[in-house]
Image (tube, rainbow, N blue to C red):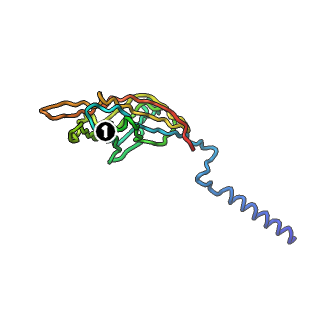
Amino acid sequence: MKRAGKNIATLVMVLLLALTVACAPLPEEVTSPLTPAVERGIIEIRVTDPPPPGVESAIVTVTKIEVHRVWDEEGAWETIFEDADGVTFDLVKVFENPTVIAYVEVMVGGFTQIRMEVTEVVVTPVGGDPVSATIPSGELKIVRPFNVEAGMRTILTLDFDGDKSLKIKTIGGKDEFLFNPVVKLLIEKEEVED
């Protein structure tokens, strides 16, 4: 009788232990097989430009970058970079060395546009002093579809046309600059290394 009681007690303990393990929450890194993992890829945005003639430097400040995702009939804008101080690049220096201004992981899918807020452009003419350029819209919009694939880096190079993007006018003996960007979008893909 004592042996039967011990066996029942042991069986009850095993059942309670099994129930405790079964009801314990999964660790955060373990996902349920019923929840599909969201596939992700990388968007990398670079800038390059043939230098405009007569200019020593043309420093552009960008404070926000958005991409337009194909979501439904209207789509949706996603912010991939935002900083009040902005990111800067010199249109003269990026010709020899394309500069990365954004690198972000996003859900895979199709995109149609890039939109950038340009808050300041400071131009230094050869032998002259730095001058703030006029920015007519304050926004740069590039319309061209691209896809982001799982495990891939989509490299978007904004190839500025220096001669057309930066216009110089001499008014009353002073140079005035107008920054109205003309940009070609180049698209490359590379596998993301682990």
- Quarter of the image holding residue 37? top right
Left or right relative to 161: residue 132: left
The percent position of residue 85, horizontal first and vertical second, equals: 32, 48
The percent position of residue 2, horizontal first and vertical second, equals: 86, 72
Q: How many marks?
A: 1
Find disc 1 in the rendering and name its residue.
Answer: 118
Residue drawn at point x = 79 percent, y = 66 percent: 10
Q: Residue furthest front?
A: 127
Secondary structure found at label 1: strand
Does 77 appear above or below 2? above
Q: Residue furthest bottom?
A: 2
Q: Considering depth in this image, is 170 or 24 the residue closer to the camera?
A: 170
- Quarter of the image holding residue 122? top left
Q: Is residue 79 visible?
A: no
Quadrant where the N terminus lies?
bottom right
The percent position of residue 4, horizontal first and vertical second, equals: 85, 67
Q: Is residue 189 visible?
A: yes
- Quarter of the image holding residue 82? top left
Residue drawn at point x = 46 percent, y = 35 percent: 155
Q: Considering depth in this image, is 31 or 175 the residue closer to the camera?
A: 175
Q: Amino acid at mark 1?
A: Val
